[in-house]
Image (spheres, rainbow, N blue to C red):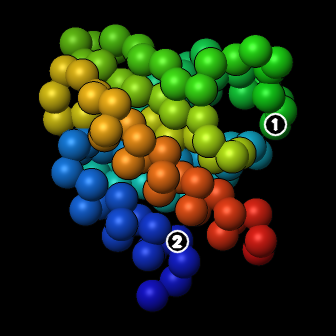
Amino acid sequence: MSDTSLFEHRLAHVDFFEQAIVVDRQGNVVASIGTEPGAIRAVAMTLLALLGVVEGGDRIGAPESCELLCEGRTFFGVRVDGLFAVVAPTRRSMTSPRLAELRALLVEEGAAHASV
């Protein structure tokens, strides 16, 4: 199993969201589950802008997470170690433990991604 598919497998077993896309600073899709990458890409790009990802860099003082209501659904964006996840949770809100679990996965993947 490749590193990317292993990460996608781990993401797929996080039971609090039904769609997710993870991109790196260059906008490359690192992993996606529950959807084709293009399906939530527009939402992802909006959230990345809110997270301060501008032309491959970070905006100083940008938040580490944010949420966006789009077409009646709430999407969450999380920025950790050069990776940016956008998720559509199965419930209306994402609790702190769930957010911490997602962040932990991103930290692990960010370290692996940076070492390549």
Query: Residue at position x 47%, y 56% from top?
Result: 105
Which of the 4 image quadrants contains residue 80? top right
The residue where tag 1 is placed is 56
Secondary element type, mark 1: loop
Secondary element type, mark 2: helix
Q: Residue furthest left?
A: 91
Q: Earlier in the sequence, mark 2 or mark 1?
A: 2
Q: Quadrant of the C terminus?
A: bottom right
Query: Residue at position x 52%, y 83% from top?
Result: 2
Query: Residue at position x 77%, y 71% from top?
Result: 115
Q: Is residue 43 above or below residue 113?
A: above
Query: Residue at position x 70%, y 17% from top?
Result: 62
Q: Residues within 10 Å of mark 2 (few under 14, many from 20)?
A: some
The mark found on residue 4 in the picture is 2
Q: Is residue 41 visible?
A: no
| Left or right of 95 in this view: 80 | right
